[in-house]
Amino acid sequence: MVKLSPSILAADFSCLEREIKAIENYIDYIHLDIMDGHFVPNLSFGPVIAKYIKKVTDVPLDIHLMVTNPMEHIEWFSQYSPKIVSVHYEACHNLYRILNRIKELESKAFVVINPHTPVLVLDDILEYVDGILLMSVNPGFSGQSFIERTYHKIESLSKIREARRLNFEIMVDGGVSLSNAQKLVELGADILVMGSAVFRAEDPAQVCQKVKNIKVY
């Protein structure tokens, strides 16, 4: 069954608890886009939001670090026991060390690649990671259109996973909606990050239910 990780970047922060409570029974994770204004041209929020979310729900945290100094951020967020921590390939000079630290802190270690980064750069780490996060928009802003080249990347990763008998998960983030969710799952995506498609829908819970009901034959 596909897993769903709504991004609170698209939520209404004036009533964040209500936004989360409306969907918490239909989701697997809550996705936090951490932006530093350096790695991406935007600022989002820090550990204080993770602390708040942990107070209002038991849904596990999915931390996406769009930052130039991921090791420091890993330590800051570790106190909130995130289920997943994702770091960008493009931002990590010591990737194995960073992934190892994430695992030491008992989170799943995911590596992210931007739309312009080819899948082949991941070849040496696929046996070691818990998951790969494919950005299907340019990171930094919510509400962008899906980059269709991502379909090919998902398919390529899925074939590699099968051929090498690996068990990493494939997550997709950016422009994911009810119009493309079925295809993403059919190609091999395991976790879908949805922002605007969930939080700006008339009935966010219904959108989440429809995604969770996706079946692949």
Image: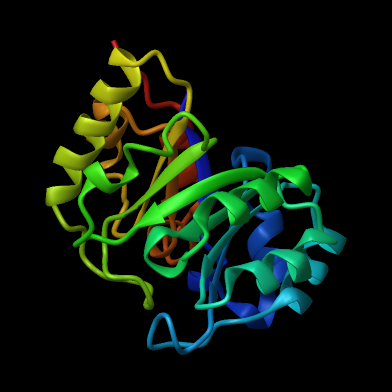
Residue 29 percent across, percent down from the top left: 62, 46
Q: Is residue 53 left or right of residue 28?
A: right
Q: Quadrant of the C terminus?
A: top left
- Residue that appears at 44% across and 26% down: 213
Asked if 174 appears above or below 42 in the picture, the reply is above
x, y percentage for residue 118? 20, 51
Kindly indicate the quadrant of the structure image that contains residue 46. bottom right
Q: Is residue 179 left or right of residue 58?
A: left
Front-lying residue, 188 or 144:
188
Is 116 rendered above or below residue 29? below
At x 24% / y 44%, what residue is drawn?
119
Q: Give the x, y percent position of residue 31.
A: 57, 57
**Left or right: 44 in relation to 75:** left
Q: Position of residue 103 (x, y in %)?
A: 70, 43
Q: Decide if residue 216 is in sight here.
A: no
- Colour scheme shown: rainbow
Nearest the eye: 139 or 159: 159
Q: Residue at x 76, y 45 (%)?
A: 104
Q: Is residue 192 visible?
A: yes
**Residue drawn at x 24%, y 22% as measured from the top left:** 159
> Measured along the vertical axis of the image, is residue 191 above or below residue 149?
above
